[in-house]
């Protein structure tokens, strides 16, 4: 390859990466815009003198839940206050799915950009890969599956009156147990194994036979990467039930923690530190509950 051709090829690689990065950033921003809109319309402040943990079903009995004037907004809040209908389940599932897209897309971006760069080189050599969208779709399918499980968990906790209308745990004991469980998981070998695959995209590719030329192969590879990501991050997503499923600050904090775990080259330091702090918070919460 001549110098001029090499420069042209490098320019094409940069263009591909910029286009892919712009698309992923736009998707992330759209997902976050939806989450922010839902948060603004679904979450109402607790009564004076109460906290999120105090807002159990019994304590809500005297509240005027007719305050929202928009019937659609009132309908959104309804699943936290009564038995779910199939439409409620579908709405909550879509909410979880969009939220997972917004939270997890930034952390998978290095892998997708690597795909775009290597894919351009493979195409130039006459052996093109399947489009990166297939890989990304496989990754998102895993988190959509997680969203279905999370929706089931939310439905069960709501039916047991263990979630407040703010969609946080109504029980300090349950919150403490969840925090301790998540904190301890941060120290487990499974967490370490999954995190290594997320931190080293090239290592993951070498261990899984590289990128695929056929769409279904790329989809399965994306699902495999999503599986490691699920093993790495799903426990942290459980913390949404503690801080509030639509608590924007809580969502943003977890998104940043997931991103730091994957891109900051300090090995296991961040999971260890966060695990210790999360466990300590759980012990403190349990002590207060007692």
Image (cartoon, rainbow, N blue to C red):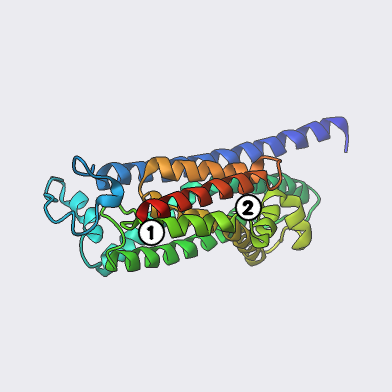
Residue 176 lies, in percent from the top left, at 43, 56
Residue closer to the observer: 180 or 133: 180
Which secondary structure lies at badge 2? helix
Q: Secondary structure at mark 1?
A: helix
The answer to which quarter of the image holds residue 9 is: top right
Q: Is residue 134 visible?
A: no
Left or right of 213 in this view: 59: left
Side of 98 relative to 185 (left or right): left
Percent from the top left, x then y, of residue 259? 58, 43
Coordinates of residue 235 in the picture (x, y in percent) = 52, 58
Where in the figure is residue 277, as x and y percent of width and height?
A: 54, 45
Numbered mark located on residue 132 in the image = 2
Write the residue at 54% across / 62% down. Answer: 142
Q: Nearer the viewer, residue 227 or 233?
A: 233
The residue under the point 79% across, 53% down is 126
Rounded to the nearest angstrom, the CA distance separating label 1 from label 2 is 44 Å
Mark sitting on residue 173: 1
Q: From what the image shows, is residue 255 above or below residue 145?
A: above
On-image quarter of the N terminus: top right
Residue farthest right in this picture = 2
Nearest the camera: 115 or 146? Answer: 146
- Which mark sits nearer the N-terminus, 1 or 2? 2
Name the quadrant of the C terminus.
Answer: bottom left
- Res. 188 in view: yes
Residue placed at 59% from the left, 61% from the top? 231
């Amino acid at each position: 390859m001549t110098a001029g051709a090499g420069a042209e090829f490098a320019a094409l690689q940069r263009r591909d990466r910029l286009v892919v990065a712009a698309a992923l950033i736009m998707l992330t921003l759209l997902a976050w815009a939806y989450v922010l809109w839902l948060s603004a319309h679904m979450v109402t402040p607790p009564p004076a003198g109460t906290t999120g943990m105090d807002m159990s079903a019994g304590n809500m009995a005297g509240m005027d839940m007719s305050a929202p004037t928009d019937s659609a907004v009132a309908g959104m809040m309804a699943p936290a206050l009564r038995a779910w209908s199939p439409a409620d389940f579908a709405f909550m599932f879509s909410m979880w799915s969009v939220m997972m897209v917004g939270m997890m897309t930034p952390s998978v971006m290095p892998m997708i950009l690597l795909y775009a760069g290597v894919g351009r080189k493979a195409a130039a050599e006459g052996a093109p890969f399947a489009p990166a969208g297939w890989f990304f779709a496989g990754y998102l399918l895993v988190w959509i599956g997680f969203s279905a499980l999370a929706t089931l968990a939310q439905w069960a906790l709501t039916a047991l009156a263990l979630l407040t209308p703010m969609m946080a745990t109504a029980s300090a004991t349950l919150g403490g147990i969840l925090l301790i469980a998540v904190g301890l998981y941060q120290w487990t070998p499974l967490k370490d194994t999954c995190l290594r695959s997320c931190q080293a995209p090239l290592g993951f590719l070498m261990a899984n036979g590289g990128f695929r030329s056929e769409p279904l192969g790329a989809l399965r590879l994306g699902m495999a990467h999503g599986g490691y990501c699920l093993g790495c991050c799903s426990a942290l997503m459980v913390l949404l039930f503690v801080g509030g499923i639509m608590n924007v600050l809580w969502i943003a904090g977890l998104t940043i923690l997931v991103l730091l775990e994957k891109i900051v080259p300090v090995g296991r330091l961040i999971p260890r530190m966060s695990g210790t702090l999360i466990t300590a918070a759980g012990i403190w919460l349990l002590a207060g509950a007692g």
